[in-house]
Image (spheres, rainbow, N blue to C red):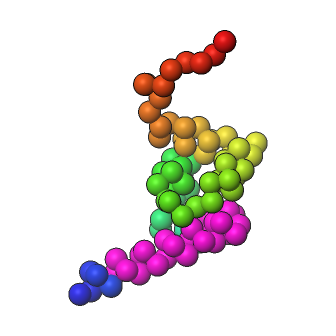
Amino acid sequence: MEEVLNTKEKKRLLLTGAARFNKSPKTGIAFLKEHGFVNETPESLAIFLKNTPRLDKRLLGDFISKPGHTDILNAFMTLFDFKEVRDFRL
């Protein structure tokens, strides 16, 4: 029973963190760090951003495309597999 309650509390905190990110990425990330969902590494944050479905995708794109967040953008891009994608350059 205790394990179920812990899982439920973690899910509630995760949803709260996602909602806070959607309002303000800076405060959302601070909340997520405080509760142990992400740490200081760009890779940890990139994994969270990729795997959390309730994040506003437009806001996510705005956040990782800012000049000061290139390390997060690079980590985010490494999470995708582009091997089977055709090259459409002209």
Where residue 29 appears, as percent x and y from the top left, is 61, 64
* Residue 10 lies in the magenta-colored region: yes
Total numbered labels: 0
Q: Which residue is found at the position 59% from the left and 37% from the top?
A: 74
Horizontal side, residue 78 vs residue 70: left or right: left
Where residue 68 appears, as percent x and y from the top left, is 73, 45
Residue at the top extreme?
A: 90
Horizontal side, residue 38 vs residue 61: left or right: left
Q: Quadrant of the N terminus?
A: bottom left
Q: Which residue is found at the position 43% from the left and 25% from the top?
A: 84
- Predominant secondary structure in magenta? helix
Camera sees residue 34 = no
Name the one closer to the observer, 60 or 45. Answer: 60
Residue at the left extreme?
A: 1
Camera sees residue 3 = yes
* Residue 11 lies in the magenta-colored region: yes
Where residue 9 appears, as percent x and y from the top left, is 41, 81
40, above or below 90, in the image: below
Q: Quadrant of the C terminus?
A: top right
Q: Which residue is found at the position 70% from the left and 69% from the top?
A: 23
Q: Give the residues drawn in magenta, as a range.
A: 6-29
Name the one closer to the observer, 51 or 47. Answer: 51
